Image: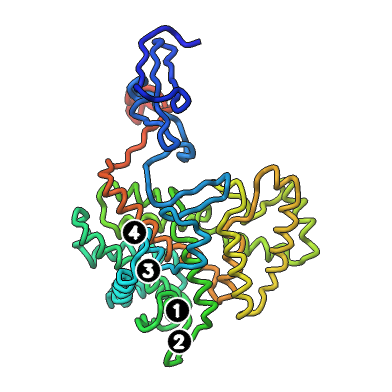
Amino acid sequence: MQSAGRRERHEGIPLGESVTITDNRTGKSIEVPIVNGGVDSSEWAKLLPGVWFYDPSFGNTASTSSAITYLDGEEGVLRYRGYPIEQLAEKSTYLEVAYLLIHGELPTPVQYEEWKHQITTHTYIHEHVRKRFLEGFHYDAHPMGMLTSSIAALSTFYPEAKDIEDPANRMRQIIRLIAKLPTLAAGAHRYSVGMPFVYPDNNIDFQTNFLSMMFRVAEPTFECDPRLSRALDILFILHADHEQNCSTTAARVVGSSQADPYSAMAAACAALYGPLHGGANEAVLRMLTEIGSYDNIDAFIESVKAGKGRLMGFGHRVYKSYDPRAKIIKQAAYDVFEVTGKNPLLDIALKLEETALNDPYFIERKLYPNVDFYSGLIYQAMGFPVEMFTVLFAIPRVSGWLSHWQEMLEQKSRIARPRQLYTGVDERDYVAINARQ
């Protein structure tokens, strides 16, 4: 029962679009409107100052408002700036999607040509980055560690990036980061396998240029089957953004201190480097390899249901239905295998998916394939080593990170400062070391 006490009310807010909070200690209540699916924490603070909302991992906390990506995990919907991911994957290109994320609208033909020109003319990296930084790593350094570190190092080459208040200056850094990530990524790979550095070829498109820097050996010009180039473009579109995930939140938190964009992007890369975030497709490949045979699938499924293993590539922190990106990527896998020949693990993956989707155990738990289930198979078929999988995630995701970083600055956000619930000992007096037992 609500206690009789002072009741604060937002006039004009229907009862069905608000929640009422009552402090049983005082009998005071406040009605808080529900706006865009959330309630304003400052209203909570008016009634309950010094009482914090306890939410480890922020799973039920909206840290910001954003106009970039809409995600409905229950219905399996993903949209960039309002455009369904299915339409973008079918009709668009990664560079056009990057423009959309950064600028908020799809480009006109003139804007798109200028955008491509800007990206293309910034693909080269400073020679000192290559010779004195990338080549300073141990010969078997992980490419993702090299990429993370080299992004952070770029802040020392572009000190003007610290002027984050200048929109034109911010855009220069955004263009540099989108353009240079493939160069840094390919350079890290080449160094890790003892191959010479390949400079960007600005006469070919963005994704083919990346493939050239990765795999070109001695041929005068790099030639690539357009189906492979297009498949990589689709993968880049699908990975460009995904709302407030761990790495995007890391970029916003670091950016909230007004750090330069290179430092913020390096922080996002470091978050992505963690196996719980960027390493899922690698785990899928390991699982498929361990299953080894079509005939072992039923036994593997039963072991998962018995709690003796995990079905990697199924389920998602947000999606409670079929990940829309997984449907698109599955078709892309067939297109790639037409060129490269079928990966023997594909038959295991397809049978595993069919079995799980018809098993009440997985249906009841809403475990459906996610984007990672097929992406590793595609990357492997195209010749990418497993160590590059997370790097391939970072290359397109930088456009999403940057769009959120820019939006955060335009919102005039305060520096991130979460609260905590203290659970340590109460006050106690210092005891000299020789008196301690």
Where residue 78 appears, as percent x and y from the top left, is 50, 53
Q: Name the residue rendered at 36%, 80% in the picture.
A: 200
Tag of residue 222:
2
Q: Name the residue rendered at 36%, 84% in the picture.
A: 203
Going by the numbered disc 3, the residue's amino acid type is: Leu
* Contact between labelled residues 2 and 3, with CB atoms less than 8 Å apart: no
Tag of residue 103:
none
In front of the other: 282 or 32 = 32
* Contact between labelled residues 2 and 1, with CB atoms less than 8 Å apart: yes
Q: Is residue 274 left or right of residue 44?
A: right
Which image quadrant for residue 61?
top left
Sequence-wise, the earlier of marks 1 and 2 is 1
Q: Secondary structure at mark 3?
A: helix
Q: Secondary structure at mark 1?
A: helix
Where residue 177 appears, as percent x and y from the top left, is 32, 65
Going by the numbered disc 4, the residue's amino acid type is: Ile
Q: List the residue tagged with mark 3.
A: 181
Tag of residue 208:
1
Tag of residue 102:
4
Going by the numbered disc 2, the residue's amino acid type is: Phe
Sequence-wise, the earlier of marks 4 and 2 is 4
